Image (tube, rainbow, N blue to C red):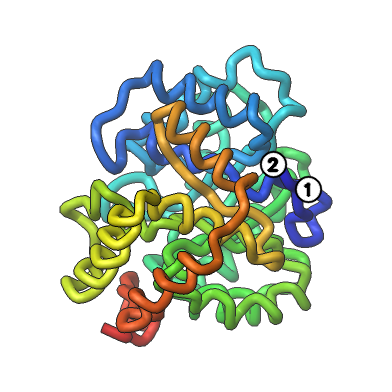
């Protein structure tokens, strides 16, 4: 496993990391014992960064992850969780709530320290509150030694640039972006030079577009428009026709970017985690990669967005 610095945090994280949303049965029903084995498989094969949230499965993911981490030496993993989102449409970024949220997450996870605490899906928040209330509350927790570092997460890219522009240097140390750096959408790349200049660590999530680039396909709740789903399916079908799982290309594409510290993959299936880790060490078939990128070109950087109207990215439908 290769490791990269997470911005200026001082943390070295595996280029492939474990996204624990699957432990909360977010995409489909999962077995808790399989999920625990998936976490152990990830750790045993070199993954050292784990990302979770109280929102995933409405605390289930944190609870199952806590069971998985019981008895695992604390220095074997870098643990990230989130504050601010607690249920469908239920957001609370107040200082009091995010402070209490940390205590609740630590209890579920069985730890007394979180390496990275992130404001979850800030596109649904008033960014004035994030800058003026939420982040200062997290700085107090960092100063008190309760957490190591502070991050923000979201789907629209504009929320990152706006919050970083309005925050004091060093307050926000990482960003977590999802569905904006993958085979069919590389819009995140436009932000990378500026983020690197500020020393911001970049976490990339959803290398398959939350199911777009998979045989299973998108779940019913997926926000992608039909044209995106159909365009992605053409690439999936082509890969199947030549005997390759497109997930392999998707993972390899993401981890190959040197400016991205780590890419999150999530599964409660130990074998899927084993496969994803193996993909990282295998040579890239550049000819096949080029063919798939050409198939995806008609939907290149076509996106979906969400959040408060003022926080949404312009749509390329």
**Residue 74 at x, y percent in the picture:** 72, 25
Please report whichever mark, 2 or 1, sits nearer to the chain's N-terminal start: 1
Residue beneath the point at 55% across and 66% down: 286
**Relative to residue 194, is residue 244 drawn left or right?**
left
Q: Going by the image, does 205 lie left or right of 194?
A: left
Instruction: Return the residue at label 1.
Output: 11
Is 243 or 258 nearer to us in this picture?
243
Image position of 202 (left or right of 101): right
Cβ–Cβ under 8 Å for marks 2 and 1 = yes
Can the viewer see residue 93? no
Q: Callout 2: helix, strand or loop?
A: strand
217 sits to left or right of 166 = left
Q: Which residue is mark 2?
A: 115
Residue 51: horizontal and vertical position, in percent? 54, 43
- Quarter occupied by residue 124: bottom left
Which x, y percent locates residue 100?
Answer: 52, 39
Mark 1, residues whose alpha carbon is within 10 Å: few (<14), some, or many (≥20)? some
Residue 279, percent from left and from top: 55, 45
Q: How many marks?
A: 2
146 versus 270 height, above or below:
below
Residue at horizontal 56%, vertical 22%? 40
Quadrant where the N terminus sits is top right
Q: Measuring 30% from the left and 53% from the top, which residue is drawn there? A: 240
Quadrant containing the C terminus is bottom left
Quadrant hosting residue 160: bottom right
Q: Quadrant of residue 267?
A: top left
Which residue is farthest top? 71
| Mark linked to residue 83 | none
Task: State how far apart marks 2 and 1 are (Cα).
Answer: 9 Å
Above or below, 82 against 79 in this view is below
Q: Secondary structure at mark 1?
A: loop
């Amino acid at each position: 496993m290769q490791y990269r610095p997470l911005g200026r945090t001082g943390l070295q994280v595996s280029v492939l990391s474990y996204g624990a949303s699957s432990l909360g049965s977010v995409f489909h029903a999962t077995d808790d014992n399989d999920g625990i084995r998936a976490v152990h498989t990830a750790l045993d094969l070199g993954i050292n960064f784990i990302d979770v949230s109280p929102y995933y499965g409405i605390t289930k993911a944190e609870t199952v992850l806590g069971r998985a981490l019981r008895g695992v030496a604390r220095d074997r993993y870098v643990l990230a969780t989130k504050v601010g989102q607690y249920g469908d449409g239920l957001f609370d970024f107040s200082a009091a709530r995010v402070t209490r949220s940390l205590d609740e997450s630590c209890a579920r996870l069985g730890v007394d320290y979180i390496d990275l605490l992130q404001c979850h899906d800030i596109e649904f928040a008033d960014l004035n509150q994030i800058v003026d209330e939420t982040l200062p509350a997290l700085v107090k927790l960092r100063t008190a030694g309760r957490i190591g570092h502070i991050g923000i997460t979201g789907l629209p890219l504009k929320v990152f640039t706006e919050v970083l522009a309005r925050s004091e240097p060093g307050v926000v140390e990482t960003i977590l972006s999802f569905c904006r750096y993958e085979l069919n959408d590389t819009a995140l790349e436009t932000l990378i030079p500026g983020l690197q200049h500020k020393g911001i660590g970049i976490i990339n999530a959803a290398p398959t577009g939350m199911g777009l680039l998979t045989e299973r396909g998108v779940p019913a709740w997926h926000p992608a428009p039909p044209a995106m789903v159909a365009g992605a399916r053409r690439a999936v079908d082509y890969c199947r026709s030549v005997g390759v799982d497109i997930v392999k290309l998707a993972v390899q594409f993401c981890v190959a970017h040197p400016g991205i510290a780590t890419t999150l993959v999530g599964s409660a299936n130990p074998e899927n985690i084993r496969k994803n880790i193996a993909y990282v060490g295998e040579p890239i078939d550049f000819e096949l990669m080029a063919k798939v990128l050409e198939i995806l070109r008609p939907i290149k950087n076509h996106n979906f967005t969400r959040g408060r109207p003022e926080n949404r990215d312009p749509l390329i439908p």
